[in-house]
Image (cartoon, rainbow, N blue to C red):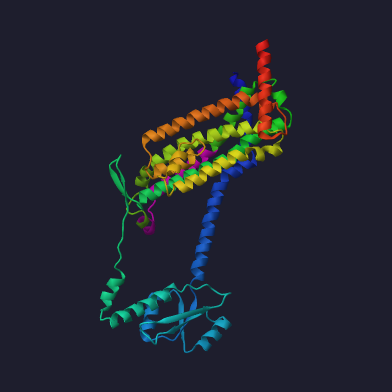
Amino acid sequence: MNTSHISTVIEEVYKKNVKSGTFIFLLLSPIILGIVILGISAIIGSATASESVGKVAIVGGEDQTIQAIETYNQDANELTYMDDENQAKEALTNGTIDGYLAINDSDPSNIQGKFYRDTSGKNVSVTVFQDALKGVQTTNRAANMGLTEDEAQDLIESTVAIETTALNFQKGTSERSQDINALVRQGVAYIASFIVFMFVANYISIISQEIAVEKGSRIMEIILSSISATEHFMGKMLGIFLVLLTQVAFYAVLVVGAYMYLVNTQLPAEIQVLLEGETINSLMQTAMPVIVWSLVFAFLGIVTYSVLAAFLGSLVSNVQDVNKMITPIMMLSLAGFYIGMFGMSFSNNTFVKISSHIPFFTPFVMPFRIAAETVSTGELWAAVLISLVFSIFCLWISTKFYKTNVLTYSDKGLFGTLKQSWKLQQSERASNDAK
């Protein structure tokens, strides 16, 4: 095998893809998507907060009820008071108010309230009014039963909280199910699974088209006259992997920069409350096993899918058939992603456990089992070995069939083209044996 030939192919593939507009878009799309999502979330949050409050008229109600409404409202809505519903309805029609609450508390133990708003106006939340009326009604009923206000409140708030604790008998540790560490690990697992899916979806298309373009233009015969099929295949694969590593390195720099910024920045009090006393460093240490193992499985998974994409790309007769040919592995990656989403809540499910050891699904499912700490170290190494052996097998098969695949032109579909390629390979082998 001539390494200079391989390096030439690698250089040509790498430069062509890195300088393309598609690669720049792939590089920046997650950042743009993140900014767009944050922007939309901020707009929706602001609009929701704005639309849920407004100018509300109160019609009827005793002093006790009015006082309770003002206490619960806490200046969220702008309150005004009117004598009758006709006046309130006219104000609503004119747009002077966004809605009005008609209260009937003639029976203190059975208070009734009706809220009216314009269908084309603000969708004012009635939760504060409902809570206020409920509080007054409860107090009145408690008084009728001879209970004090404190006794009634104590009765209302007497709930039983069940805290779930996950025991890890292998490590001899325990952890609350909704502990911030568990949530961080789960979040890292979700991000890892999503990133693998995005990389697979993007790069199987790039790799398959990289090969299909040369085959479809009928220059493959010329190329293979000066370089072996194995050298050409390996050069293509390594060139694409360098492109992928360039993208990964770019994101790694961004992540490290964000981490250093967070570590050296005083976080807002609201964020510190959410972290439950944990630091960024401690959370990172907790998530590190998920990150490391996810990277290992992501690498093996991307290698497997990329090699299969190259194999299928070598079977098409023209570029237009690429998307149709790679559909099966796209469906496999999509199935793996959805199994991973299922495993996020049911990591001990038998189906999830089995799927985590199937090479096509391992990079999507295993991160969630690691995050939930429902997988042993022995299982992890077994999954690595299975994925590694399967990747090598796929690489061997793809390399073996590459030469005959790129020289086979057929419109008989995947299996028809593969059958014709097999016959061509057998014929070539027989010819070599005869010599």
Q: Quadrant of the N terminus?
A: top right
Q: Tell whether 424 sits left or right of 58.
A: right
Of residues 105 and 191, the one nearer the viewer is 105
Of residues 78 and 421, the one nearer the viewer is 421
Residue 234 in sight here: no
Position in image of residue 148 (x %, y %) = 25, 79
Residue drawn where x is 53% and y is 55% of the image: 37
**Magenta span of residues:** 247-272
Magenta span: predominant SS is helix
Question: How many numbered markers are drawn?
Answer: 0
Which residue appears farthest toward the top when viewing the image? 435
Residue 212 in sight here: yes
* The quadrant where residue 67 appears: bottom left
Q: Quadrant of the C terminus?
A: top right
Of residues 71 and 151, the one nearer the viewer is 151
**Does residue 173 belong to the magenta stretch?**
no
Position in image of residue 105 (x %, y %) = 40, 85
Of residues 13 and 384, the one nearer the viewer is 384
Q: Tell whether 57 sits left or right of 412.
A: left
Residue drawn where x is 73% and y is 27% of the image: 219
Residue drawn where x is 29% and y is 44% of the image: 173
Position in image of residue 175 (x %, y %) = 31, 48
Q: Tell whether 408 sits left or right of 38.
A: right
Position in image of residue 118 (x %, y %) = 56, 77
327 relative to 121, above or below: above
159 relative to 260, above or below: below
* The quadrant where residue 207 appears: top right
Residue drawn where x is 28% and y is 72% of the image: 155
**Does residue 259 belong to the magenta stretch?**
yes
